Image (cartoon, coloured by chain):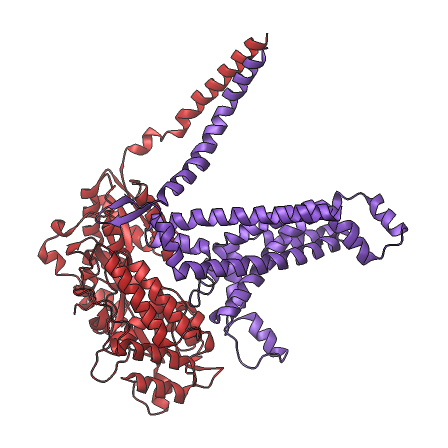
Amino acid sequence: VGSATTRWRMAAACALIALAAPACAPRAAEKAATPLAVMLPPSERPFWDPIARRFEETHPGVRVDLVEGPQSTDLRENLYTASLLARDPTFDLVYMDVTWTAKFAAAGWLLPLDGSLTPEELARFLPAALSAGEFEGRLYRVPVRTDVGLLYYRRDLLEAAGLRPPETFEELRRDAAALQSPPGAWGFVWQGKQYEGLVCDYLEVLRGHGGYWVDPKTLSVGLDRPEALAALAFLVRCIRPDPISPPGVTTYQEEESRRLFQDGRAVFLRNWPYAWRLAQSEDSPIRGRVGVLAMVHEPGARSAGTLGGWGLGISRYSRHPDLAMEFIRAATTLEAQRVLCAPTGYAPARMEAYRDTALLSANPFLRELERLHAYAVPRPVIARYALASDILQRHLSAALAGSDVPEHALREAARETRAMVGGSRTAPAAAEARP
Amino acid sequence: MSTRAWTRERMLLLAPGLLLLAAVVAVPIARVVELSFTRVVLDRAILIRWAGLDQFARLWQDGRWWGALRNTAVFTGSSVALEMVVGVAFALLLHRRFGGRGAVRALAMLPWALPTAVMAMAWAWIFNDSFGVLNDLLTRLGLLHGPVAWLGVPALAMLAMVVADVWKTAPFVMLIVLAGLQGIPEHVLEAAEVDGLSPWSRLRRVVLPLLAPSLLVALAFRCVQAYGAFDLPYVMTGGGPGGATETVSLYAYQNYFRYLDFGYGSAIAVQGVALVGLLVAAVMFLARRGGRDHA
């Protein structure tokens, strides 16, 4: 009796498994349309929808899946990394931050795109935004929208005091000190937390002092040169001994600093273009009282704004790379730039968009942005950029927090960066110093 | 049915479960150990090369890893010690009978039920220098003159992280100890009271020794969890300022996902597992010996 029961149990178990298996397989009906997938931040999804629907209209039998990823850039990078590591064909397109290009290309996860676009097509993009998508001389990412670091100031306060907008670091310091009344209102707020934003801020001050981080051609590291020290000394002097920045600036990201500025509690703010739209919103206490500049510079050096922005690349594991290329083309037409940038205030990557009447009437700030993009500088395009950035972040943060002296911090950062650059086989190709 | 047939049937029925465990636990662990003996070369492809013990040798010369290890040790030591004290105190309090005890117990458990990332974000705002509740409170009480950037000073950032962790996980210790307390028979305590032991001696000589197994479980769990702390520093401080709150897990993660340095990330993970294994074994050994001495 026992063994009969056993056999019966076994048969039942097998039947269950056999019944369950087809339920796990993808249903045939969904396979009808060719899917094309990309992961985006949820905040951008509504503005990409019309672009995707339009593409579906012009390409019958294609379905564009706009997958909402996490809002945080780091988390989306991780999701893409995990998916590409597993050679997963889920995402045909990669919606990429500027700093991902080198890493993803060096890992062999992206298809080169330069062969698919004509020189005329390429010439329509902002040169800085385009070169940020290059790695070792080939293009892996087509820019869609760009970002550039800016210096916001309270025009009303400066005018009332009879001051002209500052041009040098010393003038910025002086004006900030003259117009602040801490702890209620501070002179200058920026991003001093140990994270990518700190590197962006420092790069602007560094270039404004005539220094460099990693020279792309010679692989020389400039972090222990006098200009680099002067740049860090400026940031440290913002905090002590005569502060123009709140002590908490060493914990701020973009939003903490922007809130202070928007509450009317800061005279100068270093931030990205998004802060403009918020400063001009209906309920903003500083509406109409804000001016914008490129980051100041030392006499004889040039202003610099760190280049950011987003673009599209094609996954090596995509099953429809040609279709994906079609989508990139469709997503970067002037019409698509209008659809994406008019309601959001994003800065378009195509040059002609800055002269487009439809876009300019939706966002007059583009006129300023076009001018300010001339100061854009890319971060070094090297495969292990994340490590280079972390090395710099840690030592800058230690100096700002006062747990290390600037000379020592930068000497260590330079030593570690040299060891890293020397130790990696892939040499940087695109230029940090490229005009 | 014969014993052998029984065994065969049992093995057969266990097989899917064992296979599943092997697939989701054993294989990944083996893969991490394997990767820890390799190095990654990025050359338009991810090339994995045998590296022997190089990655472990790299650990010894890596100041950042030593720093992360020190931070992890400080964090684990101080947060677990505080959690044990606070958790036991709360458990003793909530073991007593009083009106609304159920509601208070549920309330005390709330921090444990919150996702760490959410509560870490909330604590980061509490410790914010300009908008933070803490600075506002301390200033109103006249204890502070001018805002303190809690997360901007290395020692204070670590303190802030410990406070957040104790707030979140003391309820876990409380829960385990509360369960242990309910296992202590009333008559033992009554006997101690009749024998004239003061409340303090009752706690020290009767309750705590009887609680030893629960305390041990809580201690071991918390040591492992605190050693692996990742989400709290990731959200609250990002490992800063100046790397002062970077834990070993955070560093391993950076190597994996941000630097694509799987060999080194795996070496850090393997080394970490070995170390935490030793730590838990030491805690268990010392506690057992301590328990025997008591008895």
Provide residue B1's location: percent of width, then percent of height: 59, 10
Q: Where A435 sits versus A83, above or below?
A: below
Provide residue A161's location: percent of width, then percent of height: 36, 91
Residue that protrudes farthest toward the left in the picture: A119
Between A306 and B221, the one lying in front of the other is B221
Between B94 and B285, the one lying in front of the other is B285
Count the numbered circles shown. Answer: 0
Quadrant in the picture for residue A150 = bottom left
Q: Is residue A428 visible?
A: yes
Image quarter (top left, top right, bottom left or bottom right) of the C terminus of chain A: bottom left
Provide residue A62's location: percent of width, then percent of height: 25, 40
Relative to A395, B148 lies left or right: right
Q: Where B248 sits versus A175, above or below?
A: above
Say which residue appears at 32% left-offset and 41% top-offset: A86
Q: Where A23 sits versus A228, above or below?
A: above
Residue that protrudes farthest toward the top in the picture: A1
Q: Where B113 sits versus A285, above or below?
A: above
Image quarter (top left, top right, bottom left or bottom right) of the N terminus of chain A: top right
Residue that protrudes farthest toward the bottom in the picture: A162
Relative to B43, A21 lies left or right: right
Letter of the chain shown purple in the rendering: B
Relative to B235, A300 lies left or right: left
Say which residue appears at 51% left-offset and 21% top-offset: B11
Between A12 and B17, the one lying in front of the other is B17
Letter of the chain shown red in the rendering: A
Quadrant in the picture for residue A219 = bottom left
Provide residue A246's location: percent of width, then percent of height: 45, 78
Q: Is residue A273 visible?
A: no
Say which residue appears at 12% left-offset and 61% top-offset: A123
